[in-house]
Amino acid sequence: MSKRTILLITESTLGRFDLSGGGTPSVTDSWVRPSFASQSVGTLVDAALRLGKSRNRQVYVLTTRCWTGSVSLLSDVTAQASGDELNQMVALEAEAFSGISAFESAFASQALPPDELGDNRYWLTQIQDQDLRSIQDAVRQAGGKLLGVAHPAVPTIDAPSTPTEEWRSFQNWDESTLLIRGCGEAIADFHSMSSGLQSQRTVQEFVTFFKGLDSDTTLQCVGLSELPPLIADLPEAKDNRQVDTTSESDLKAWAAAWMRSQNKQSVGLPLVTIPKRPMSREVGISIAAVLGLVMMGSCFAHYRYLKGNLTEVNASIEQIQDQQNQLNEDQKKLTELEKQQNKIASETAALEKDAQQVRSEVVRAQQIIQRGRLRWPSLVDSLIEVSDDDGWVREIRSTDQAVAIRGLAIEDAAVHRLAARLESTNASDQWKIFPARTSVSDESRLIEFTIDLVAIGREKADSKRSRIPSSTTSRRGRYVRKP
């Protein structure tokens, strides 16, 4: 939880408000007592901090000892100015109203909408340097951190509910009266009256500022226990909010509203922050000398440390070199092993290739054997199927993979029918059947024929066929199945 504290210092009131952190700030503790106008602002800050137990906090000091008001500058003058130059011009312009020298004060400004003539307007908070230093010293001695100094004016006690909600605020702080008008989170106009409502001129300014107030405008009054007649006679306004600065409960609502303005949850205010003090020449020389001595001591200690560990470092280097040499030897051995492994892999691949070839030949031999087993039964069955009344098979002669079928026929047509039928049977899948060779017998005047068959895969390249020494002969007559 953030430790933030608001100190309120006016001519009549001395207050401390401790606030919680988070998105919506709220007052956790508060202390309010009468103030002493004769005391310095630094003394009053110290007294306000002592009202609570914990003083090690982030502190905002809101006091009427600083001046706040608005100033106008011609647009031609501010057109080329920016940053610090523009703030200095605003402070110089405000010097005539605040009576505080621009060169002996700290200030903060916030831009306002241009006036009716088009001149640029600025809301300014200004405090003398000596007062700011005394405030800073009091907060530092108490163990806190000063975040900024501002006037206790706060535009809105309740944050606007909509961006288009119109509101007006009347505030009286000591001898100054502030009039603020806005819409949503934007300030439309700001006016300060240093003499309150005592003169006819300020009364006229007040009436002009609140002219046109209607029932839909939120009106907030801060600083008076009783409304002045000029406000009391105004038409009844919506959500009329009155904050009595002599009431501690009302001041709690004021403190929470002021903190919301710093959290960007409401209308912002000009806050004087503490610039970093420049380093003096003496302090700079002292720091440079100390840093030089520290660097010399560090270098000497580093040298002693390196010298003391030099032997150990050399031994470590020799050990690393030995390990590197051993690693090189191991690398050479690994290279030789890789070569041997590649050689074995090549030999294994060659053996695998030879084994694959042997397996192929075995498979082919098995296929040939199986085909041989089926070849002869298929041939005999086919001869039975192709029997013809005009032809007789007399003998079947066979060699290794060749067969010669011989027989007699009455006419050539019977031989051709026999050969054609044989080619259409299952025997054609196992045997290559050649055209029949015929001749006429001198004795019987019958046609002798020979049909040659060669096992598929064993065909001869030329037409010359060897004679078959062994034979298997069937009895004359019709085609018969070979026993």
Image (tube, rainbow, N blue to C red):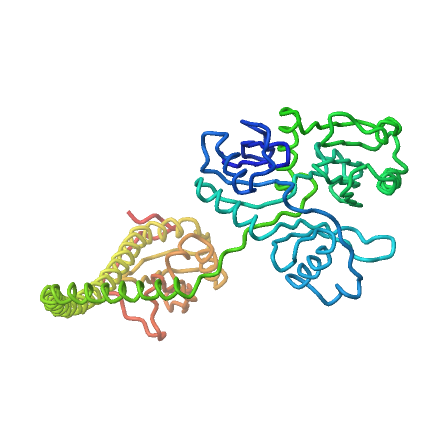
Residue 446 appears at what percent x and percent y? 42, 63
- Hey, which quadrant is residue 291 in on the image? bottom left
**Left or right: residue 205 compared with residue 396:** right
Is the residue 52 above or below the residue 203 in the image?
Answer: above
Q: Residue furthest front?
A: 38
Residue 56 appears at what percent x and percent y? 45, 38
- Number of numbered discs visible in the structure rendering: 0
- Hey, which quadrant is residue 31 in on the image? top right
Residue at x 68%, y 44% (from the top left corner): 268
Residue at x 18%, y 67% (from the top left corner): 303
Residue at x 78%, y 38% (from the top left corner): 196
Is the residue 436 above or below the residue 386 in the image?
Answer: below
**Left or right: residue 117 compared with residue 290:** right
Residue 417 appears at what percent x and percent y? 48, 58
Q: Nearer the viewer, residue 396 or 280?
A: 280
Q: Nearer the viewer, residue 381 or 206?
A: 206
Q: Nearer the viewer, residue 277 or 92?
A: 92
- Hey, which quadrant is residue 247 in on the image? top right
Residue 173 appears at what percent x and percent y? 70, 37
